[in-house]
């Protein structure tokens, strides 16, 4: 019991410092959070899968910038190394989307696809990202969509308000 209280105190002390380095939290609900990172606002979630050894946990989200160069751009950091020339497929509900991949990251292919992904997210309960490891073995990162619409709207609204201040 004492150890648990100590751990809670350490987390309570360190959490604001860690959050500040990653941006300020605008909204957090369900599996998603909306973050203000200065020039970019993001709605973001973590994969349900635990991180592979020596890897960061997979994340997915939508980015919005005040200059509108990124407005609803979907991005994902993959949970495992990606095989060169491998396809990365995002499936929202039952709707698949082919993403553009480079390194351990993948992105939506433009504004039409971004809009389609955003629409699909609002009507589904889960999504997954599939690709291949360098060995050729397929892997899947799974995500919940509970809270996604509100986080997306919060991130978009914050960046829209920044546009008005320009």
Image (cartoon, rainbow, N blue to C red):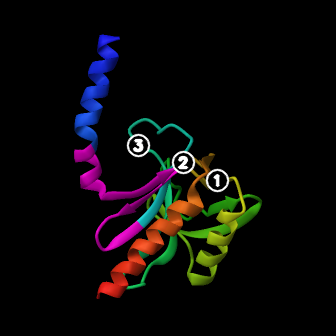
- Give the structural element (helix, strand or loop) at label 1: strand
Give the answer, above or below, for where 161 lies relative to 21: below
Q: Secondary structure at mark 3?
A: loop
Look at the image and give the residue range highlighted in magenta.
16-41
| Residue at mark 2 | 31
Q: Quadrant of residue 89?
A: bottom right
Tell which of 96 and 7 is nearer to you: 7
Is residue 78 left or right of 55 when viewed as pictured? Answer: right
Q: Which mark is residue 55?
A: 3
Question: What is the distance, in whole Å, between disc 3 and disc 2 at their CAs?
Answer: 21 Å
Residue 87 placed where, x, y %?
61, 64
Q: CA distance from mark 1 to mark 2?
A: 14 Å
Quick one: label 3, few (<14), some, or many (20+) residues within 10 Å? few
- In this view, the residue in front, 70 or 3, is 3
State the image coordinates of residue 147 (x, y, percent, origin top left): 57, 54
Instruction: Answer few, some or many: residues within 10 Å of disc 1's Cα (few below 14, many 20 plus, some between 14 and 19).
Output: some
State which quadrant residue 118 falls in: bottom right
Write down the residue under mark 1: 128
Please report the residue visible at 29 percent of the width from the left and 88 percent of the height from the top.
Answer: 166
Compared across the picture, whether 70 is left or right of 86 comes to left
Give the mark toward the camera: 1 or 2.
2
Residue 51 x %, y %: 47, 39
């Amino acid at each position: 019991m004492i150890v648990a209280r100590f751990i809670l105190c350490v987390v309570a002390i360190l959490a604001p410092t860690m959050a500040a380095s990653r941006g300020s939290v605008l909204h957090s609900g369900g599996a998603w959070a909306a973050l203000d990172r200065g020039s970019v606002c993001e709605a973001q979630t973590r994969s349900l899968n635990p991180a592979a050894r020596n890897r960061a946990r997979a994340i997915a989200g939508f980015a919005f910038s005040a200059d509108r160069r990124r407005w609803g751009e979907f991005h994902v950091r993959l949970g495992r190394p990606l095989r060169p020339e491998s396809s990365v497929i995002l499936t929202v509900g039952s709707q698949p989307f082919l993403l553009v991949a480079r390194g351990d990251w993948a992105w939506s292919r433009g504004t039409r696809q971004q809009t389609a992904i955003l629409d699909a997210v609002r009507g589904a309960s889960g999504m997954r990202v599939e690709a291949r490891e360098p060995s050729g073995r397929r892997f899947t990162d799974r995500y919940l969509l509970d809270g996604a619409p509100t986080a997306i709207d919060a991130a978009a609204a914050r960046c829209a308000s920044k546009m008005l201040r320009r």
